[in-house]
Image: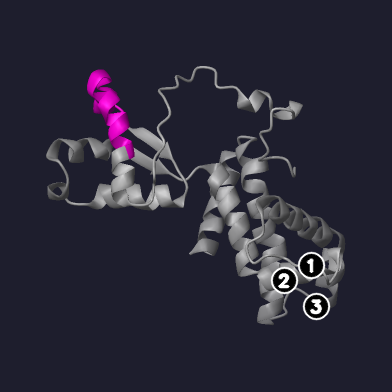
Amino acid sequence: MLTIHNYNNNITERKKEQSMKGLQLIGFKEQNLHSIFDYINALKIILSINDKTQYLKEFVASIVADWPGQIFIRKALYKTLSEFQSNFSQDIRSFLPMLGPLHVSLNSKEQVILVHHSFFEKLFHFVFGENKKLAKKPRPWRINLLSELSKCGWIKIKNQIIKKFGNTCKNIKYQTTIDLLDNLIPAVIDIYAILFRSGLFEEYVETIFHIWTFFL
């Protein structure tokens, strides 16, 4: 579970996932993607190929990207036609930016740690010692580790805690902690590693909605 995002060649279990059968690689182009115009220039590379294939006349092209790719491409889509070259502005409407399930998983795990940093800092010190320091923005492997520790630890003590405080305790700190341990952490752990990879579409969509409300 903790090596789910590690695609190192020496991990046998990941060999099949590295296969790209049926994929035609067009090429690599290094880009500085820091603004709306940077992303437009990147899309022009694809559109130059489309001039020959005319593929986008009948289909849309999905672009799986992290949040910067989402926001800048969507801004380009919402801009008025007069701001760009007229022929290019029409073609850009064929692109559909999508936040991929892997990005959802990585971003949501990180966001849970950032929002509830004080909780995870206490857990980190309890497990690894007071002298150890938890970064304000931990690395992904440490985020995975803390999330798994929280999930497994909560399973062991949940019944005793609920019995002690009951289901009707209105204390905001208690309710927030229960929501974190019972809902948020399992959601961000399972969204990619289990739900998406297992093809559980209905559960995936339901969990995506729950994560989206947390981000909102």
Of labels 3 and 1, earlier in sequence is: 1
Locate residue 129 relative to residue 42 in the image: left or right: right
Could you say whether the residue bearing mark 3 is in a helix, strand or loop? helix
Q: Is the Cβ of the residue at disc 1 closer than 8 Å to that at disc 2? A: yes
- Badge 1 element: helix
Q: Which mark is residue 123?
A: 1
Q: Mainly helix, strand or loop, the magenta region?
A: helix
Residue 70 position, x and y percent, is 40, 49
Image vertical order of residue 159 relative to residue 149, above or below: below
Q: Which mark is residue 165?
A: 3
- Please state which of residues 34 and 106 is positioned toward the viewer in this rendering: 34
Image point 25% across, 51% down: which residue? 78
Asked whether, in this view, residue 76 is left or right of residue 18, the answer is left
Callout 2: few (<14), some (14-19), or many (20+) C-alpha neighbours within 10 Å? few
> Is residue 134 shown in magenta?
no
Mark 3 or 1, closer to the camera: 1
Q: Which residues are magenta?
A: 42-59
Please tell me how many numbered marks the rendered image carries: 3
Above or below residue 86? Residue 36 is below
Which amino acid type is marked by label 1? Leu
Q: Mark 1 to mark 2: distance in Å?
A: 6 Å
